[in-house]
Amino acid sequence: MILSVDGGATKTFAAIADESLKIRGIGVAGPSNVRSVTPDISKKNILEAIENAKNMAGVEQVDKTFFGLAGYGDSVYHSKMLEDIISFTENEYEITNDGEAATYLVTLGRDGIVTAIGTGSVGAYIKNGKTYRIGGWSYLTDDIASGYWISRKAIQLSEKSYDELIENTSLIPIFEEYSGTNLRNFVSSLENNFDKRKMASIAIMVDREAELGDNISLKTLELAYNEIKLMLDGMSLKMSGDFIIGSVGGVMRSRTIRKKLESSYNNIKIFYGYHVCIGGLLKLAKNHNFDLRDSMVRMLDELLNGLSDQEKSYLFIE
């Protein structure tokens, strides 16, 4: 049995597969990005996700583990912190950042460019077998087009609408109903009780209002799409010949953004955040079969129904 763990700022997702790479169990817990939570919480959530996956799979031990953890490689400090966190692992393991796992999911090691757009964001491209990274600097200065970025941008535009500087938006009553207070108090509460995951989840409301035709919401998603396109086009300039293009992450669940990407890039490969674990499993198994990857995606999607309500809440699915 092999295990893959994908840890980010919103959730930690684990998947267990047998020697034929049939996914036997999955598990979900809270965030494990050490730039968002404490090391103790990170470790707790990694262990919980693994335990949940083992319970679904009906196994007690695994032979190898792949960890794709947000924050790893960002600095020597954060990498050492994550290495200490997973020191509980007794079996053979590999560790890298979640962006590399997402890149492998899309390209299976071939030349290609990938954006990973979830709570945060990062880009990566593989050229002549070597992986390069762009973005992912910080939620304070970067994380462009991410769930956090979309939420912040939508709130900024809502503030301008509230002040009657720009057109009205349905986001204001949505935010006020969600928080049970007026917009100014809502913004103040986000500042005084900062929670990156909660902040990023607001993007779901923005996407929903965009579907209903709210212009400010549509403008926000258009700005996010433009940033993703900038990343993809910039990485494309580094490439030559044939290469794979893909985008991975929770923001890809936005139909508005997916449609824009699919209309701009022929044969772009799009996956959701919880699919990244499959990249880890395939990398661990040194398997480069695209048909198998697509089959594993379908297997994982079917197993989502077996998650507890608490686990589903981490994925923002019902």
Image (spheres, helix red, strand yellow):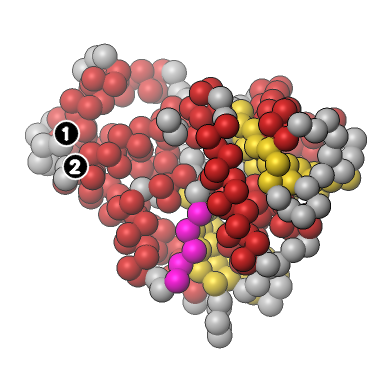
Q: Secondary structure at mark 2?
A: loop
Q: Quadrant of the C terminus?
A: top left
Q: Is residue 27 above or below residue 228?
A: above
Near-viewer residue (101 or 295):
295
Q: Residue at x 58, y 71 (%)?
A: 112
Apparent side of residue 117 relative to residue 257 in the rendered image (left or right): right
Rendered image: mark on residue 115? none
How many numbered discs, if any? 2
Query: Which three-letter amino acid code belongs to the residue tagged 1?
Result: Ser
Q: Is residue 22 visible?
A: yes
- Tell whether position 115 is magenta: no
Q: What is the x, y in percent for residue 290?
A: 62, 67
Residue range corresponding to the magenta coloring: 267-271
Quadrant location of residue 267? Answer: bottom left
Mark sitting earlier along the chain (2/1): 1
Q: Residue at x 42, y 41 (%)?
A: 147
Near-viewer residue (315 or 185):
315
Using the numbered discs, state the Cα–Cα distance from disc 2 to disc 1 in whole angstroms: 10 Å
Q: What is the x, y in percent for residue 145?
A: 40, 50
Q: Secondary structure at mark 1?
A: loop
Label 1, residues with CA under 10 Å away: few <14, some 14-19, many ≥20: some
Is the Cβ of the residue at disc 2 closer than 8 Å to that at disc 1? Answer: yes
Apparent side of residue 76 relative to residue 108 in the rendered image (left or right): right
Quadrant location of residue 185? Answer: top left
Label 2, residues with CA under 10 Å away: few <14, some 14-19, many ≥20: few
Query: Which three-letter amino acid code belongs to the residue tagged 2?
Result: Leu
Q: What is the x, y in percent for residue 148?
A: 42, 38
Rendered image: mark on residue 212? 2
Q: Residue at x 73, y 53 (%)?
A: 21
Q: Is residue 287 above or below residue 129?
A: above
Residue identifier under label 1: 170
